[in-house]
Image: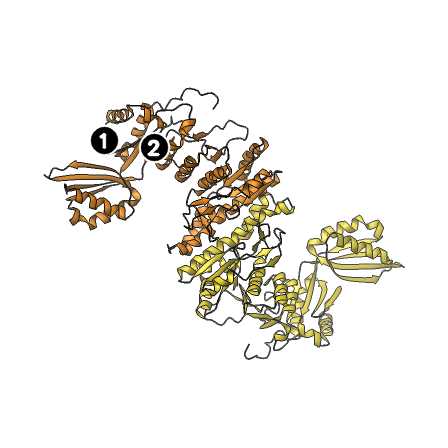
Chain colours: A orange, B yellow
Amino acid sequence: MKFGGTSLADITAMERAAGLIAAEAKRGMALAVVVSAMAGETDRLDGLACKAGLLDDSRNGRRDYDPVMAAGEQISSGLMALILRRMGFDARAWQGWQVPILTSGDHACARILRIPENPLGQAIDGGEIAIIAGYQGVSDEGAITTLGRGGSDLSAVAIAAALGAGRCDIYTDVDGVYTTDPRMVPQARRIDQLCYEEMLELASMGAKVLQTRSVGLAMNSEVPVRVLSSMMAPQGDNPGTKIIGEEQALERQVINGVTADFAAARISTLGVPDEPARTALMFKALARENINIDMIVQAPSRAPGAANISFSLSEADLARAQEVLAHLSAEIGYDELHADRSVTKVSVIGIGMKSHAGVAATMFQTLADENIKIYNITTSEIKISVLIEAQYTTLAVQALHSAYALDQSPSPEEGR
Amino acid sequence: MKFGGTSLADITAMERAAGLIAAEAKRGMALAVVVSAMAGETDRLDGLACKAGLLDDSRNGRRDYDPVMAAGEQISSGLMALILRRMGFDARAWQGWQVPILTSGDHACARILRIPENPLGQAIDGGEIAIIAGYQGVSDEGAITTLGRGGSDLSAVAIAAALGAGRCDIYTDVDGVYTTDPRMVPQARRIDQLCYEEMLELASMGAKVLQTRSVGLAMNSEVPVRVLSSMMAPQGDNPGTKIIGEEQALERQVINGVTADFAAARISTLGVPDEPARTALMFKALARENINIDMIVQAPSRAPGAANISFSLSEADLARAQEVLAHLSAEIGYDELHADRSVTKVSVIGIGMKSHAGVAATMFQTLADENIKIYNITTSEIKISVLIEAQYTTLAVQALHSAYALDQSPSPEEGR
């Protein structure tokens, strides 16, 4: 079981979470529980650390950032263990170095390398509820490390994998993964089950309910994950969303979700001499700066022997990309460079796409019916993304949500 | 060097402390620095832990209190290391388990058992400034332990002893130990030097500047301690108070300090049948409840064959002591029991008392001149304490401060 910060806002919220843990324990479950820092604590500590001197970006400079940040989860693990003991359960707090959760030495963004099954497994087999501080580990030098934002999801999946747990339940402030953002589409529905690959795409595309890395780890280690609400009563109906392997899925929806990534941006270079070396120069220079580019479109320019090249990228990288290209304007030889922040990347995601034709056609027809212009397109085995003008985002998402019949509940499934 | 919470109130205060550390480093000192939690943090964490469930008083119940509390020092150690690195120094944060500071498993009040000289010593020899989280250690079971309130002083002295440090400087919000409380006696002066024994008595009698246990450890391990201000400029005059062995003291004041303990209380039992077994029963019952009693006076009662027995104790124990004695009223056979909270224990302390006659006479004469009645008296080799009515406390302390010539500076001492 993993509880996020909003489920641990204060002692009252922690007591509600403890009730959910107690209910599982009473069902006879052997439990490992991963906790995040209390809501707001990570931001508070990060603010202090930045003020103290996180300017130093060296590995040693960031080394002492990690004990500051890890303290947030240390506090909530101790508090949760105290609450459960008061309720009569045998609980114990575990810090990353105590488990130990062995990580690389990349401070503030460490990778989990290995979690020995013992002594944690022994304690749990002995009847203890293990309350594990998320987001943290220990390097082979014995230094406290942290895993980056959202790292407690990663801790939870890694511990579930190490213990061979039957399930990894991620408790959060929503009751599951939705077909799309309910603030945008009131008809959005909770999804009953998703494949890892679909969840990976949903998480990458901005569904904030699960950290992307943790989904990848769950997929690789085949840990069944469930996303569910921490606000429900312990005995209430709380099915959440199951995230499982493709082969375990009883029934596949063609499309399971529609996402909108507002943090997309677009750069267009007009009148680039149509020589492969120019294009290569452009994309090599961006790659050298670690700027990921996404959808590329090349079209003939009005000028003879020239092309217009446009691509999408993350808004956060836009200014740097403009700089890189401005610096190389002579070598690339473009006439004009346009940067556009007012674009959105809308995606439809579904593992069923692999075996269903016509998914792309439905998407293009739907957007055409709404007179929404598509700038760029990219596809993968289970996802189609298009770049559109930001002002049409809600219109596009609502239309696609209806077009793929996500407004209606799927046929009832028994025994799941 | 050790910095308390008020010296670490926020990042600005921590930067001032870092300036003092930097100044010592520039003088070529090899440095271990112990830090407390930021001001208010320990209270905040204790409040959360109590709310979570510190009601369980068992050893396992308190076990998970300690990771919560230790987080405060973990945060400030990381922040201080970040600040010093930003200033260009090679600093590193050390948690109790990393040093390791090996303690007993008595959670929330652990005793330090042993601090291996390495790897801490190696890191310092290698040029690093070690920033050590105070107040905490690790048990032989690998659990985080804490040392009780004021425990960072203990950490500092223990680490100084383990490293064979030439000095242990305790930075605080006052510029040294005073002859008495300056709020009570404006003529109070900073004391240049004190023997461990004197400091131990001063600390036990309510001078809050140093934790009592840390003074005892300094005495046993012969670590020279200095108490000084963290508010001074790094290059300014900041002599503080030196606390050293009796044999190192160049000149001994007869009396070095006058203290007033307002937390004293007094119980009188009147008309107790004058049989040793009755008195023994009374004090055994109190001892069984861990109630420390201090000054005992037995005087003949008006009733024939009976005595009045009065004793002083800590105000915190008063209610429990009354309960114990009420429960045994028949067996002890007293006529009346009076409890009095409005008493103060005033003490004069000085190692020179050992070789100077007339110290007690001066005390009694001074109080008699002010018409202050003495209820009870107790003496040790270097201390005389009297119990008086609380309303005369300031008058008594001021009169004694003058009578022992503490208002004037001692003759100037060279080379100290």
Q: Judge from the rendering whether residue B252 lies leftward or rightward of residue B358; answer left or right.
A: left
Residue A118, by quadrant, is top right
Q: What's the amino acid at mark 2?
A: Thr
Q: Position of residue B365 (x, y in %)?
A: 73, 73
The answer to whether residue B23 is above or below residue A198 is: below
- Percent x, y for residue A266? 25, 40
- Residue at the (77%, 61%) spot, across then down: B296
Residue A69 point in image, percent of width and height: 46, 49
Q: Which amino acid does label 1 sit on?
A: Lys
Circle 1 residue: A373
Q: Is mark 1 on a helix, strand or loop?
A: loop
Q: Do the residues labelled 1 and 2 touch (CB within 8 Å)?
A: no
In the rendered image, the vertical position of residue A70 relative to residue B11, given as above or below? above
Q: Is residue A191 visible?
A: no
The answer to whether marks 1 and 2 sit on the same chain is yes
Name the residue rendered at 85%, 56% in the picture: B277
In the rendered image, which residue does mark 2 sit on?
A259
Graded by Cα atoms within 10 Å as few (under 14), some (14 to 19) or many (20 or more), the crowding at tag 1 reads some
Q: Distance between the residues labelled 1 and 2?
A: 17 Å
- Chain for numbered disc 2: A
Dot 2: element: strand
**Residue B95 can be seen, yes or no:** yes
